[in-house]
Image (tube, rainbow, N blue to C red):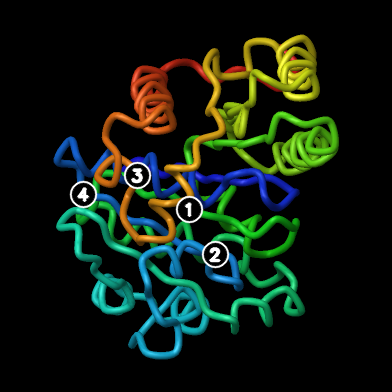
């Protein structure tokens, strides 16, 4: 199972849309997809109309039972969706309580261990993170092989990008090898000078770390979210879907490529 984490230390940059869109496209290629919602606010869970208070298990179940994890316990906590190859490990407001516990006693590795137990049950896992550095983001970064960093093409969003790249530098010392990462320009509006200028700054500053494409502003992505339908099913010919298809193809080509170190 490939594990990709979608993260940025700023909200509203398209993390959940990216996770759902890429996951939906992967599922359309007959891959078994698991979407993990680690944000206590549960945007990804809400996308699929999952009521956190009604499901039997959720992501908090994994942490609550960290000392007695089993594949069956994890699979029982996963919620199916109306789409055959898409499953969700939903969020819970209780996840917010984990931040007070810190990352001692192996707390930073719980999710990775859990996903390892069900590695044969899915082909791709996408983890949607909260926009803050804490035990949940640390778990998501420790578990994954590829980090997707959506960044809105506006100047204020660049601060969040700088923060998460700094976070990677700090966490990188504890990994045996650097974490592959790709910056994904989102919400691009070619009609505005601010968006065009921000995209130019992103490319000039971070170079090869930036995906060559960009995700455009597309109201159909918002409409798909409201309907609770993966974008590639809701509007297969939409501009946003075509961009995410290009991103998915790029990620699959890069999946086995050598990892670039930060700043190279």
- Give the quarter of the image for residue 71: bottom left
Q: Is residue 210 left or right of residue 58?
A: right
Quadrant in which the C terminus is drawn: top right
Q: Is residue 12 left or right of residue 89?
A: right
Q: Which mark is residue 32?
A: 4
First in residue order: circle 1 vs circle 4: 4
Quadrant in which the N terminus is drawn: top left
Q: Is residue 36 left or right of residue 12?
A: left
Q: CA distance from mark 2 to mark 3?
A: 21 Å
Look at the numbered discs 4 and 2 and tell me whether their residues touch, using CB distance below 8 Å: no
Q: Residue at x 24, y 76 (%)?
A: 72
Nearest to the eye among marks 2 and 3: give it: 3
Kindly give the residue lying farthest to the front in the view shown.
191
- Crowd around label 3: few <14 · some 14–19 · many ≥20 (10 Å): many
Q: CA distance from mark 3 to mark 4?
A: 17 Å
Q: Residue at x 36, y 60 (%)?
A: 227
Q: Position of residue 208 (x, y in %)?
A: 63, 11
Look at the numbered discs 1 and 4 and tell me whether their residues touch, using CB distance below 8 Å: no
Q: Which residue is mark 1?
A: 127
First in residue order: circle 4 vs circle 2: 4
Q: Position of residue 179 (x, y in %)?
A: 58, 33
Q: Residue at x 25, y 66 (%)?
A: 81
Q: Position of residue 85 (x, y in %)?
A: 19, 53
Look at the numbered discs 2 and 1 and tell me whether their residues touch, using CB distance below 8 Å: yes
The relative height of residue 186 versus residue 200 in the rendered view (above or below) is: below
Secondary element at tag 4: loop
Q: Which residue is mark 2?
A: 38
């Amino acid at each position: 199972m490939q594990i990709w984490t979608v993260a940025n230390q700023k909200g509203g940059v398209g993390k959940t849309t990216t996770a759902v869109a890429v996951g939906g496209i992967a599922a359309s290629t007959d891959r078994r997809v698991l979407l993990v919602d680690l944000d206590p606010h549960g945007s990804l869970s809400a996308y699929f109309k999952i009521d956190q208070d009604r499901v039997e298990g959720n992501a908090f179940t994994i942490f609550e039972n960290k000392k007695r994890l089993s594949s069956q316990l994890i699979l029982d906590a996963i919620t199916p969706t109306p789409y055959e190859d898409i499953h969700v490990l939903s969020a819970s407001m209780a996840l917010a309580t984990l931040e007070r516990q810190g990352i001692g006693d192996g707390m930073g590795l719980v999710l990775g261990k859990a996903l390892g137990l069900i590695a044969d049950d899915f082909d791709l896992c996408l983890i949607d993170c909260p926009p803050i550095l804490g035990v949940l983001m640390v778990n998501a970064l420790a578990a994954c092989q590829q980090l997707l960093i959506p960044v809105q093409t506006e100047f204020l969003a660049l601060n969040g990008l700088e923060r998460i790249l700094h976070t990677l530098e700090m966490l990188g010392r504890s990994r045996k090898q650097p974490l592959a990462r790709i910056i994904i320009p989102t919400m691009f509006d070619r009609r505005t000078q601010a968006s065009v200028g921000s995209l130019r700054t992103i490319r000039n500053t971070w170079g090869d770390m930036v995906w060559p494409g960009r995700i455009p502003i597309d109201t159909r992505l918002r409409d798909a979210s409201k309907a609770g339908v993966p974008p590639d099913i809701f509007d297969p010919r939409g501009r946003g879907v075509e961009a995410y298809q290009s991103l998915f193809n790029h990620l699959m080509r890069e999946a086995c490529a050598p990892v670039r170190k930060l700043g190279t």
